[in-house]
């Protein structure tokens, strides 16, 4: 099993959370706690860089949905960056690809996009995301 590694970097009113390793039942609590701590600090926009994710299952996807919901409840824009094919495929298979705003990893390392333009995409469009 590959342990989950989480780091955050603060800059210019946004935070990039870098996720590396497996996102599954065993690591879901780690992602949830880490991202909730970041969101509770009111960072502005939160960007989750998923480029280092090597595996994701339904529990990992559930964790992303929960993080999205938590961010929305705290009026914090949430973007996913650098999602590898394994993550993109799961989002598409579950019809959640329209529920998340996914940006390139390069965009995540620069200034955040104008969140007023992406806000409609950040809102849940799936009944699953509303639970």
Image (spheres, rainbow, N blue to C red):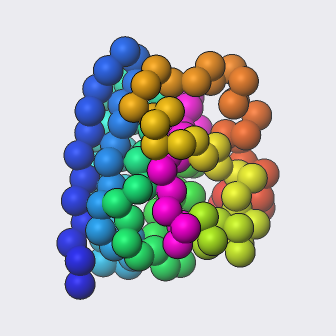
Q: Residue furthest front?
A: 106
Residue lying at the far bottom of the rendered structure? 1
Q: Nearer the viewer, residue 109 or 12?
A: 109
The answer to whether one can see residue 44 in this image is no
Q: Is residue 28 left or right of residue 68?
A: left
Identify the residue at image location x=29%, y=26%: 10
Measured as percent of width and height from the top left, residue 96 is found at: 70, 61
Q: Is 15 rendered above or below residue 96?
A: above
The residue stretch that appears in magenta: 70-87
Q: Residue at image x 40%, y 56%?
A: 51
> Measured from the top left, where is residue 125 in percent x and y?
78, 51
Query: Which quadrant does the C terminus fall into?
Result: bottom right
Q: Residue at x 23, y 77 (%)?
A: 2
Q: Nearer the viewer, residue 51 or 7?
A: 51
Query: Residue 59, percent across and down?
Result: 47, 75
Residue 55 is at least partly visible in this image: yes
- Extreme-top residue of the structure: 12
Q: Tell me which residue sits at (25%, 53%) in the image.
A: 6
């Amino acid at each position: 099993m590959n342990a989950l590694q989480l780091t955050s970097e603060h800059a210019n009113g946004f935070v990039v959370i870098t996720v590396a390793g497996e996102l599954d039942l065993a690591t879901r609590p780690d992602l949830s706690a880490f991202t909730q701590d970041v969101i509770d600090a009111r960072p502005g926009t939160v960007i989750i860089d998923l480029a280092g994710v090597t595996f994701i299952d339904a529990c990992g996807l559930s964790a992303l949905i929960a993080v999205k919901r938590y961010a929305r409840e705290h009026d914090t824009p949430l973007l996913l960056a650098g999602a590898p094919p394994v993550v993109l495929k799961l989002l598409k298979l579950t019809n959640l690809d329209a529920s998340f705003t996914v940006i390139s990893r390069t965009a995540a390392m620069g200034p955040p996009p104008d969140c007023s333009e992406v806000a409609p995409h950040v809102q849940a469009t799936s009944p699953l995301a509303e639970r």
